[in-house]
Amino acid sequence: MKVTVILPVYNVENYLEECLESLVNQTIDDCEIIAINDGSTDNSRLILERYQSKYTNITVVNQKNSGVSKSRNVGIDLAKGEYLYFCDSDDYIEKNLIEVCYEICERDKLDILWFSASIIDYLNIEKGNKTIDTDMQQFIDSSKIYTGIEITSQVIRNSVLRSYMWNKIYKRSLFVDNNFKFNEDIVYEDVDLLLKILMKANRVKYIPQKLYTYRRRENSITTSEVSEKTINSLKYVLESKFEYCKEVLNQHEGNKELLLAMKKYICMRMELLTLAIFNFKGYINEEYWGYKFKKYFKYYFSIFESNYISEYIQINKIIKMCTRKNIKFEYLERKIENILNEKYIELFKELDLNNKDKLIGIYGIGNHTINLIKAYERYMGRVQAKIIFIDSSKSKNECEEYLNRKVINVSNINRYNFDKVIISSFTYEKEIFLNLINHINYSTNIIRFYENEWIYIYLMKKYR
């Protein structure tokens, strides 16, 4: 058997047939579908049994309601395929997903193949269903085969690690040899297991094809109401990930890239879970979280002195959320504020805006630029360099002004010998950078100031 599709099913009668049609019409023959009916109270069981009677490669397992983790574990135990694929029963896949993934896995001898997907956000129905692209091609080289450690470091460092099981196909031996099972006592079981799976893989590849469509909707597992089990699961995930990251760092002490990635991962987990838990009114134990976060912060600052300002901004955000819940970290607040001040001074020194002998071009004439200059003057003092603003949409006659300084069209940039050009845009940063490269015909230092989204978020909030 080439591939086993594991399909947990619970009360999805409105979506199940579309999902099953996408599975039974795959362009590959040697594929089994194990559907686990998790005690559905709607017509899901009848739909499954109808498809089972029609298609010989479908096996239906009926169990009392035990949760998606139990369903997936049952599927893993019954699977005969060389590869495992986990599908959600309210979504659907492209008809060639299994064939494309299997052939690439066999050709490149992969443990995991990662692919792209479309996410349809039905929670914003009033704005029209929003499709979110999960393409990671700008961060991951689709022509390269990574080790699990390499790709884990890459996706964490670029903040694109998502705990989805459905956008990957896995070698079954990866689960069997490492005794990987989903934790049946918690929700957010994907978060708990995925990092461990990735770290154990020897050969991982990413392809940019959109092969899956995920519906983000009300009453799904990821959007259902909070419960005590939800809170306990969040606690478990935070603590288990924290301990796991410590274990990984001890095992790979000399790997600087992994060290930076794990530190950022701890920070990301703390921020996301803190934000989630603090929104669950009535379930918060301030004493518990105060104790835990002090422990986590102490370890966080002990493992590595990061040069990445984004991490300190994230930590600062967590501390402020804690402060609103009367969990105070006076020492850490001062420490973070001092670190941020030092980092911003380093960042702004590079701009040379206080050097009256420099001619500086600033590409962008919106709020981003106003905030940049306000922040600069706070940290460094008055701007003294000669500044000319650059814009793509302004006329070419150079008679317009912005902040009492000349604005030129980018097409006229070669009339000026800029010492530096600062790109002051976040949304169009990459587009502006390419536009600048295409126009400028001399060597100069181009500074992509808002390339890091956390600088953008911090300054926009602080100076708006």
Image: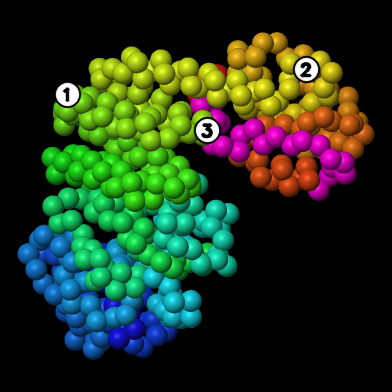
Q: Which residue carries the number 3 mark?
A: 307
Q: Which residue carries the number 1 mark?
A: 287
Measured from the top left, where is residue 194 in percent x and y?
Answer: 32, 57
> In this rendering, which labeled residue sits more in front, label 3 or label 2?
3
**Which disc number belongs to residue 161?**
none
> In this rendering, which labeled residue sits more in front, label 3 or label 1?
3
Q: Is residue 434 above or below residue 330?
A: below
Q: Which element type, helix, strand or loop, lies under badge 2?
A: loop
**First of labels 3, 2 by sequence position:** 3
What's the magenta region?
A: 438-460
Examine the rendering and report whether any part of residue 443 can be seen: yes
**First of labels 3, 1 by sequence position:** 1
Does 324 sit left or right of 370 as displayed? Answer: left
* Quadrant of the image occupied by residue 404: top right
Q: Quadrant of the N terminus?
A: bottom left
Q: Which residue carries the number 2 mark?
A: 355
Q: Is residue 221 above or below residue 352?
A: below
Q: CA distance from mark 1 to mark 2?
A: 50 Å
Measured from the top left, where is residue 131 in percent x and y?
Answer: 47, 54
Q: Is residue 251 above or below residue 428?
A: below
* Residue occupying image coordinates x 81% and y 15%: 356
> In this rendering, which labeled residue sits more in front, label 1 or label 2?
2
